[in-house]
Amino acid sequence: MSNATPATHSPTALRPDRPFPTVGVIGAGVMGTGIAQNLAATGRRAVVLDVTDEILANARTVLRTNLRAMALFGAERCDTDQAMSRVDLVTDVEALADVDFVVENVTEEWAVKREVYPRLDAVCRPDVVFAVNTSAIPITRVGSVTSRPDRVIGMHFMNPVPAKPVVELIRGVHTSEQTIETAQAFLASIGKEGIVVNDSPGFVSNRVLMLTINEAIFLVQDRVAEPAEVDRIFRTCLEHRMGPLETADMIGLDTILKSIEVLHDAFGDDKYRPAPLLRQMVDAGYLGRKRGQGFHHYR
Ligand code: NAD
């Protein structure tokens, strides 16, 4: 698609002149692949870390498919092969020694996230900012397991990442003003903007969204309505672009359950108790779009 354009003008050519030329992306799941796609499409190198070669092979397939779709239908021209050549998929944390910024997107579980940060801390330059992509885990808690709590910030991307221009930026107790500026500059460099809020479990968006989704699941469990009707009411009567159960399927039902558990634990308030049907669906492996089956079926 971009063959007629000199490489230096292509959005997919590596641009060391741009800020944050190399970015560490931790976790190659739904969010990690979306962020790597965004980085590669804007001419940055993404070093993507996950735990197994199998997961990384799957991420490579997802990335290539989505970059190709971007090349065909996206607003920006995007050469798939060039963009893919900017993505390093790795299992060794040492590969992050030279990154200029880190976005962490591992599983929404404190026990998993807390293991990652001391390892990043030991490898990354001391000036590098760690952006925590989480649905609900408090940013101050993440900062407490690093030696750089002033350079830790919440960066709650929306899904699908390449399509969503606005991000919730979360200021932990120790997050410095300079880190907020750096995070905004990073977001601007990939065509996004951050709305800054203070640290609290679930921040603004998920404190409201997770309750809505959980209540919608209770409606299905109580046989008040089928998933299709619940979603249709939100789309047609309330003019939402997606219903709450479609949104849950897109996020991943395992991530929804973990997020609600984090809110329940953090606030000690039973309004956040997870719907038993949600637990059952996760046990059954019906995790939403990523598994082809959730409240709706996907081909
Ligand atoms: P996911 O389950 O799709 O992917 C998580 C990935 O992290 C997996 O590939 C897993 O193998 C990897 N991982 C686990 N431990 C690791 C480690 N020690 N080192 C490297 N990788 C490791 O989850 P996701 O949906 O991509 O969510 C990631 C984070 O982003 C979560 O904290 C989630 O709450 C948050 N988030 C998700 C969404 C969404 O819509 N899915 C939106 C905003 C934020």
Image (cartoon, helix red, strand yellow):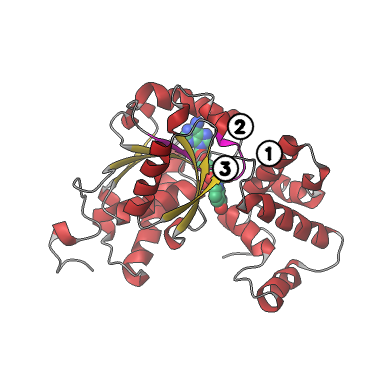
Q: Which quarter of the image is occupied by the C terminus? A: bottom right
Q: Nearer the viewer, mark 3 or mark 2?
A: 3
Left or right: residue 151 versus residue 288 is: left
Residue at x 75% of width, y 50% of height: 278
Q: Which mark is residue 110?
A: 2
Earlier residue among tags 2 and 1? 2
Give the Cα separation between the discs numbered 3 and 1.
17 Å
Image position of 40 with respect to 246: above or below? above
Span highlighted in magenta in the image:
129-139
Q: Which residue is mark 1?
A: 262
Q: Pinpoint residue 285: horizontal percent, then vertical percent.
A: 67, 48
Residue 101 location, quadrant: top left
Residue at x 37% of width, y 53% of height: 37
Give the Cα separation between the discs numbered 2 and 1.
9 Å
Q: Pinpoint residue 88: horizontal percent, then vertical percent.
A: 31, 41
Q: Pinpoint residue 26: horizontal percent, then vertical percent.
A: 44, 38
Is residue 200 or residue 131 the one in the foreground? 200
